[in-house]
C-alpha cells in the first residue's frame, strides 16, 4: 500500500510543528542569526546571575526552534524515504545543529572557569536559576575529561561528522541492498526489502522463512565490505575522542558520562554468562511447537503458535490497549487517549515507510509513535511498548526543564518493556483461546530473550570490535564475521544451526548512543520484569512510586532512579527475579502446548 492510500486518521498530524515545508523554511532561514545572537554572551556568562538566567532563557528559545525543525524532518523522512524535500532538509538542519554545537562550545569551559561554588551564590541571588543547579554543576563531575573551548569546538564538529557513518549505514540497508524475491505457498512471487523482510521472517511457513533468510544473507554479503568499512570508521572516531579526552576506552567514556557504575555493567555481563543455560529451554519450545528435528536461525523468528490467529483492526487494538493499561489508573490511560485523539501515532505500513517501531520526542513537543501494524496480537504488544515510551516522555516533558528531559536508555526502556510484560500477562489470563495464550506468552519469551540474551550477545560483539579497532588490530568484514560467530556461540553454544555470520551488519543499534548502546536493553528488561512483578502482584504503594519514576528524566542518576522503585542492579536479586519469571513462562507455555497436542 502506498502512503497516499492510507486514511488521514491513521497518519501523524504534525501541523503543530509545521503545516508545510514553506513554513519550515521560514524558521530555518532565521535560525543562523538567532544562533549568532547567543554569541553576545561569550565571555559574559558569569557577569551576573541575571545574565546567566537571560542566557538560559534565550538559548532555550533558539533550541526550541532547532528541535522543531529537526523533529519535523526526522518524522517526514521516516514515513517516506522517497521524500526528497525531507532528505534534503534533514541534511540542512543537521548542518545547522553542527554549527550551533560548534559555536556554543564556549559555554561549558566558561561556566567552569570560576568553580562550582559560584552557582550557590548565583542561585541564592536569583532563585529562578534553581532548576538549573544540577545542569550547572554536572560538568565538574567530568572535569578532567573536558577540553578548552577550542578542543570542545573541534570535537563538536568531529561528532557532527561522525553522524554520517550512521546515515550511511541506514542508506545502505534501506536503499542499496538488493534482495532476491521469495515465493509464497500460493505461488505468488514477492519482492522484499530490508524493511519488509521482518514480516516474512515471522511467517509460520518454514520455507518462506528460509527463503527470506537466504535472500537477506545474500544481500548483506554483497554489501558487507562497505558496511564493515563504515562501521570501522564509526568505532575509530569514537575511540579516538575517548583517547584524547583521557578515557581508557569508549566504554569507559560511555559509562562515566551516563553515570553507570562499572560494577553494574560487570554484574550484567556476569549474569548473562551465569544464566545462559536457560536459553536452551527457550530453543526447545520452538523445536516442540514447530515439530522440528533441528532448529535453524530462521526458526527463532515466528510467533510461538502454529495456528492462524485472529486479526485485529487498529480500532480494536486501541480498545485492547486502553483496557489493558487501566491497571495503572486513569492518570495513565488519559495520556494514551490523548495520543490517539491528537493523532500522535502513525501506524499503517506503506511502501515508502521505514521499517520497525519507535517513539520520538523533543523537550518542547509531544512525542510521536511510529510503527507498522499488521493486525496481529504481536503488533498490539509492539504498540504497547512504544506507548510506554510515549507516557514516560510525556511526563518528563511536563515535569522537567528542557535540559533534563532526555533519560539514559537503561531507564527509558523500562517503561516500554514493562508495558509488554504487563500486556502479555493480562491477555493470557483474559483469553480462553489457548493459541492466543501461547502467542502472548511466547511473545514475552521473545521479548526477554532478545533483550537480555540477544542484546547481551551484541554487547559482547561490540566490546570485541571496539577493542580490535582501539588497539589497531586488523579489522575488516571477515574479522567482524568471526567475532560475531564467536560471540553468538559463547552465548548459545551449537544448539541452533547455521548462524548467519554477517547478522551484525543488520543491527542499527551499534550506531546509537555513540557506541555501547545495546547493553542498555539487557539492563532494562531485567528492571522491567521486576517492575511488572510488583504491579501484577499489586504491591502496596508501588504505582505511586512508578508514576514518579516516569517523571524523573535525567534529573537524577539512572541507578538512583531505579533504586527509587526498589531495584539495585549491583546485586543478584533483580536478575534472579527476572530469570524466574522467564523460566515460569517457559513452563507455562510448555504445559499449554502439551494440552493442545
Image: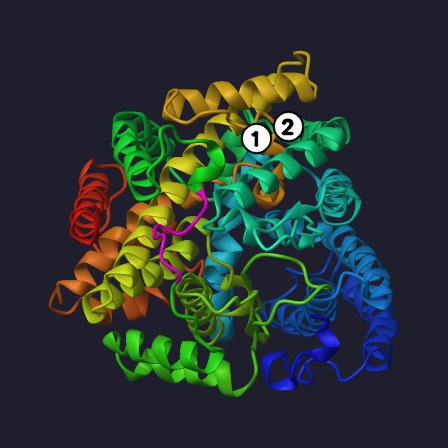
Q: Quadrant of residue 224?
A: top right
| Helix, strand or loop status at disc 2 | helix
Mark 2 Cα shell of 10 Å, populated few (<14), some (14-19), many (≥20): many
Q: Nearer the viewer, residue 593 or 527?
A: 593
Q: Position of residue 292 (x, y in %)?
A: 36, 34
Task: Say whether marks 2 and 1 touch (CB < 8 Å).
Answer: yes
Q: Quadrant of the N terminus?
A: bottom right
Q: Position of residue 62 (x, y in %)?
A: 72, 71
Left or right placement of residue 221 versus residue 463 in this view: right
Left or right placement of residue 156 versus residue 56 in this view: right
Q: Where is residue 481 in the image (x, y as percent from the top left)?
A: 60, 22
| Helix, strand or loop status at disc 1 | helix
Residue drawn at (50%, 30%) of the image: 252
Which comes before the other along the chain, label 2 or label 1?
2
Q: Quadrant of residue 509?
A: top right
User: Can I make out residue 130 in this image?
Assistant: no
Q: What stretch is highlighted in magenta?
A: 301-308
Q: Nearer the viewer, residue 11 or 586?
A: 586
Amino acid at each position: 500500500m502506498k502512503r497516499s492510500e492510507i486514511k488521514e486518521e491513521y497518519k501523524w498530524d504534525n501541523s503543530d510543528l509545521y503545516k508545510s515545508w514553506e513554513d519550515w523554511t521560514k524558521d530555518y532561514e532565521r535560525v543562523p542569526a538567532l544562533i549568532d545572537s547567543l554569541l553576545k554572551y561569550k565571555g559574559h556568562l558569569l557577569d551576573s546571575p541575571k545574565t546567566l538566567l537571560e542566557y538560559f532563557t534565550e538559548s532555550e528559545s533558539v533550541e526550541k526552534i532547532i528541535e522543531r525543525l529537526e523533529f519535523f524532518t526526522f518524522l517526514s523522512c521516516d514515513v517516506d524515504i522517497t521524500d526528497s524535500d525531507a532528505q534534503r532538509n534533514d541534511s540542512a538542519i543537521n548542518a545547522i545543529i553542527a554549527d550551533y554545537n560548534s559555536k556554543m562550545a564556549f559555554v561549558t569551559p566558561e561556566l567552569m572557569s570560576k568553580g562550582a561554588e559560584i552557582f550557590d551564590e548565583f542561585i541564592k541571588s536569583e532563585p529562578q536559576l534553581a532548576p538549573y543547579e544540577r545542569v550547572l554543576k554536572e560538568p565538574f563531575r567530568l572535569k578532567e575529561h573536558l577540553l578548552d573551548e577550542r578542543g570542545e569546538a573541534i570535537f563538536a564538529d568531529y561528532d557532527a561528522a561522525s553522524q554520517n557513518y550512521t546515515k550511511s549505514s541506514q542508506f545502505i540497508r534501506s536503499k542499496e541492498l538488493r534482495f532476491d524475491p521469495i515465493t509464497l505457498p500460493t505461488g505468488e512471487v514477492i519482492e522484499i526489502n530490508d524493511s519488509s523482510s521482518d514480516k516474512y521472517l515471522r511467517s509460520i511457513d518454514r520455507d518462506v522463512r528460509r527463503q527470506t533468510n537466504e535472500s537477506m544473507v545474500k544481500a548483506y554479503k554483497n554489501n558487507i565490505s562497505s558496511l564493515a568499512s563504515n562501521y570501522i570508521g564509526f568505532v575509530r572516531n569514537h575511540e579516538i575522542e575517548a583517547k584524547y579526552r583521557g578515557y581508557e576506552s569508549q566504554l569507559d567514556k560511555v559509562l562515566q558520562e551516563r553515570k553507570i557504575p562499572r560494577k553494574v555493567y560487570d554484574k550484567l555481563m556476569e549474569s548473562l554468562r551465569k544464566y545462559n543455560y536457560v536459553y536452551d529451554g527457550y530453543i526447545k519450545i520452538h523445536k516442540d511447537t514447530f515439530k522440528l528435528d533441528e532448529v535453524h536461525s530462521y526458526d527463532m523468528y515466528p510467533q510461538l503458535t502454529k495456528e492462524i490467529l485472529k486479526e485485529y483492526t487498529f480500532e480494536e487494538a486501541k480498545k485492547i490497549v486502553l483496557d489493558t493499561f487501566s491497571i495503572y489508573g486513569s492518570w495513565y490511560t488519559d495520556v494514551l487517549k490523548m495520543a490517539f485523539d491528537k493523532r500522535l501515532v502513525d501506524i499503517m505500513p506503506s511502501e515508502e515507510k521505514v521499517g520497525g517501531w519507535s517513539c520520538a520526542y523533543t523537550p518542547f513537543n509531544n512525542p510521536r509513535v511510529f510503527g507498522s501494524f499488521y493486525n496481529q496480537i504481536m503488533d498490539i504488544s509492539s504498540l504497547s511498548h512504544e506507548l510506554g515510551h510515549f507516557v514516560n516522555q510525556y511526563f518528563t516533558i511536563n515535569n522537567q526543564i528542557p535540559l533534563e528531559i532526555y533519560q539514559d536508555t537503561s531507564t527509558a526502556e523500562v517503561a516500554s518493556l514493562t508495558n509488554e510484560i504487563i500486556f502479555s500477562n493480562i491477555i493470557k489470563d483474559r483469553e480462553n483461546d489457548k493459541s492466543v495464550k501461547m502467542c502472548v506468552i511466547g511473545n514475552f519469551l521473545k521479548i526477554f530473550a532478545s533483550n537480555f540474551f540477544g542484546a547481551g550477545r551484541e554487547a559482547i560483539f561490540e566490546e570485541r570490535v571496539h577493542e580490535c579497532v582501539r588497539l589497531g588490530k586488523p579489522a575488516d568484514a571477515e574479522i567482524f564475521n568471526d567475532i560475531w560467530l564467536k560471540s553468538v556461540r559463547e552465548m548459545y553454544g551449537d544448539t541452533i544451526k547455521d548462524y548467519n555470520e554477517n547478522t551484525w551488519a543488520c543491527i542499527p543499534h551499534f550506531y546509537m548512543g555513540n557506541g555501547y548502546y545495546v547493553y542498555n536493553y539487557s539492563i532494562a528488561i531485567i528492571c522491567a520484569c521486576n517492575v511488572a512483578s510488583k504491579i501484577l502482584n499489586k504491591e502496596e504503594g508501588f504505582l505511586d512510586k512508578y508514576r514518579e519514576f516516569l517523571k524523573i528524566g535525567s534529573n537524577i542518576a539512572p541507578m538512583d532512579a531505579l533504586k527509587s522503585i526498589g531495584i539495585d542492579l549491583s546485586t543478584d536479586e533483580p536478575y534472579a527475579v527476572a530469570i524466574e519469571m522467564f523460566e515460569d513462562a517457559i513452563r507455562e507455555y510448555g504445559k499449554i502446548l502439551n494440552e493442545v497436542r
